[in-house]
Image (tube, rainbow, N blue to C red):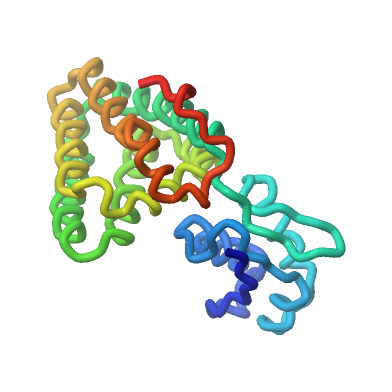
Amino acid sequence: MVHEVVINDAFDRDAAITPQIYRILRERIIKNDLPPGSKLSEPELARHYEISRQPVRETFIKLSEEGLVIVRPQRKTQVTKIDFPTVLQSRFVREAVEADIVSELAGSADKALIKDLRSQLKNQLKVAKTSRPDFINEDTKFHRTLAEAAGKEIAWKFLEGLNSQMDRVRFLSLGQFPAEQLVEEHGKIVDQIERQDKAQASAAMRKHLRRLINDLPKIVRQHEEFFDRFDPELIDT
């Protein structure tokens, strides 16, 4: 089904416009509020927000670079399908980076960090029972906290851009995984960091990040219209 969409999210006119338009559109694509095939109109969005077309055009370019939209000159921009090989490669890079991050953190086992992570785990359990979208936000916060604690903020920003397609799958998979089990896996990662066991911290992170990939065929079968270039033989567990 093709959707023609004008976004209704408000934004702050006293702040830079382009980053806000980009954030709004990117978030709605990743959350699948704008599914594959949704058409986005540069002039219509500009009129809706009462802004020039330039910020919208710049946003479309950034989203195109992430593989989230296809920009067609003289035609409306369209939301892409989720590219399956890109999801797999994004996971591969993320696993390698985050496994090294927790290994590094296990070298010091900072007490303040452990306390913060334990607090996040408690909040994750609360959110898991009420709102799956909010749980994903908490999950992202957990992984971002690890990266920042290791002084890898630049690496995390790189991963955020790389993870666009993978994040779309995460929202499609809401309800697929018991959130409490994901929190338990987070807890095991924290446990190994606290024990200063680098090898086990790394292994716990790799196991955690491979969960989504292992269940990808099931997710694709449930949402075939969202995916492009699916090949189960590409999955290496």
Looking at the picture, does residue 38 appear above or below residue 112?
Answer: below
* Residue for point 38% across, 40% down: 148
* Residue at image coords 19%, 47%: 178
Q: Relative to 201, say whether 68 is above or below.
A: below
The residue closer to the viewer here, 106 or 165, is 165
State the residue in front, 50 or 119.
50
Q: In the picture, which quadrant includes the C terminus? A: top left
Question: Horizontally, is 189 left or right of 151 in the view?
Answer: left
Report the front residue among 36 and 116.
Answer: 36
Which residue is pictured at 15% across the width and 32% down the height?
A: 188
Can you give x and y, in whole percent of width and height, for residue 79 in the image? Answer: 63, 57
Q: Position of residue 77 (x, y in %)?
A: 72, 61
Position of the N terminus, as image quadrant, is bottom right
Q: For residue 162, which quarter of the picture?
A: top right
User: As drawn, which residue projects farthest toward the right?
Assistant: 74
Q: Is residue 185 left or right of residue 98?
A: left
In this figure, what is the number of numbered marks? 0
Q: Quadrant of residue 182?
A: top left
Lateral position of residue 26 relative to residue 130, left or right: right
Please tell me in which quadrant of the rendered image residue 197 appears: top left
Q: Position of residue 230 (x, y in %)?
A: 52, 35
Name above or below for residue 123 compared with residue 95. Answer: below
What residue appears at the point 30 percent right and 61 percent down from the top-left corner? 134
